[in-house]
Image (cartoon, helix red, strand yellow):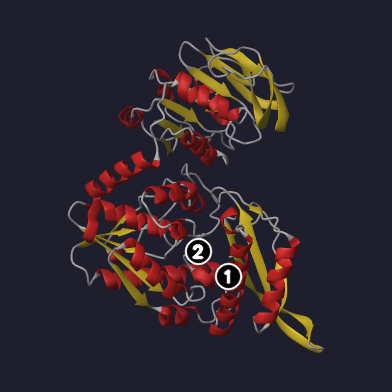
Amino acid sequence: MILIIDFGSQYNQLIARRVRECEVYCRIAPPDIGIDEIKKIKPEGIILSGGPSSIYEENSPRTDESIFDLGVPVLGICYGMQFMVHALGGVVNGAGKPEYGFAELEVKIHDNMFSGIEKKTTCWMSHGDSTESLPEGFKITASTENTEIAAVSNEKRKLYGLQLHPEVEHTPLGRKMLENFIFNICCCEQSWTMKSFIKEAVEEIRNTVQDSHVILGLSGGVDSTVAATLIHRAIGERLTCIFVDNGLLRKDEGAKLKKVLTEHLKINIRFIDASEQFLTALDQVTDPEEKRKIIGKIFIDVFDSEASKIEDVKFLAQGTLYPDIIESVSAFGGPTSVIKSHHNVGGLPEKMKLDLVEPLKYLFKDEVRKLGTELGIAEDLVWRQPFPGPGLAIRVLGKITEDRLEILRQADDILIDEIKKSGYYRKLWQSFTVLLPIKSVGVMGDKRTYENIVAIRAVTSNDAMTADWAKLPFDLLGLISNRIINEVRGVNRVVYDISSKPPATIEWE
């Protein structure tokens, strides 16, 4: 296992992904993790992530410096390297010339970190500080034209530093560098697979739940479906799933999911129609964050009511994923700007008196799909595109009415139908329509119209942390637009969203 100490890098989750791609388990911890806890974890190696701070700032993040005396290999990346250098007696200061973007890296010493790496290779730099002098026992192993001390090592103590970012795709041989650290230096074995994850997760669920019962909100999406199947494997009939129809689902979704989930999962599922309760509470609400909070509150109330009908329920299970946690809170505990609240992140109201079970909370979406396949879940369920917990409430921008929801349902149904026919469905992370809170002038049948505008959103991504707008063929977009305008009453204009994440988010609200 590799322990990653998070100093706040925007690339932190990429480090975890790269380690897991090597089939080695990793855990991310905040800088204030105690040395006793690290000893208890017994990592084969420690990676210190990058971060936005300067090491010489008063409140810059620090971790226990005794990690360098554990005899465990340590790799510092960017800020992580600067922390290592500073902690061991070296000097770090503001760079005379900051370095951002591509740079040519010249390897001067082919130590274990650079084994099999070409003498000159491209790398990605992103730093305003540089190391001026090294601690005793360290050597410079690589340089760039701008940064003389671009990589360092102390082979005797198995301490390594990279000013560059090996985890990003812009460093072509970065994966090789990380593999060198993981396998050559830390001597890890490729033992972390979805099969091994299932074994460990089932054991952990059983130890947590004991003889109690668990209730789970089943949306029909891949996250909740996989979570339900995993928990069911662990505790069987002591899991009760509840599917809540909040009136904000896509066309015929409730009926379709009832049929599919009952046939494939063979799990105890209760179907609750609470649509009137949700839509009444959302009447006249236009602020997206308020929509989310209202939906989250009612969602909890429904569960509270249902939980009271089941004996010995002590846990609520959720399909929370790692990106949900990252977007909602700062991973390293410092001040951060919350992008959007997730109704399934951050715990439960005290009145509910249930503890959380979140078996997928450290997994990325692609890992969840692999897990679902390993669990034997039907392909259509495993590859279902993500659908937000608040449903169409955050895709109908502005006021939510039955008429506006119906317009969006019809438009979305046409979009998904054509996306599937074209063979693009599994190539896209998400594809959906958004109903805008404005109208536009049009001409239909030689008559002036003043009708609604539908936006199409389609993105490609690996984990939703970043996303690029999908370059769908113009003919396909034209076909979708033509069908929506001709088949959905009340729409006279269709637009295509060509924003990437960042700066935009995938959902509009």
Q: Position of residue 406 (x, y in %)?
A: 56, 81
Marks 1/2 in contact by CB < 8 Å: the verdict is yes
The answer to whether 55 is drawn above or below residue 453 in the figure is: above
Circle 2 SS class:
loop
The image position of residue 395, as x and y in percent, is 58, 70
Does label 1 or label 2 sit earlier along the sequence?
Answer: 2
Residue 83 appears in the picture as rendered: no
Q: Residue at x 52, y 20 (%)?
A: 160
Q: Is residue 255 left or right of residue 121?
A: left
Return the residue nearer the eye: 454 or 479: 479
122 shown above or below 193: above
- The answer to whether 282 appears left or right of 470 in the picture is left
Question: At 58% across and 36% down in the image, what residue appears?
Answer: 53
Judging by the rendered image, the residue that carries numbered circle 1 is: 395
Task: Please say whether residue 63 is visible from this viewpoint.
Answer: yes
From the top left corner, tell me how far across and down residue 269 is, in percent. 30, 68
- Residue 216 is drawn in which quadrant? bottom left
Q: Which residue is mark 2?
A: 388
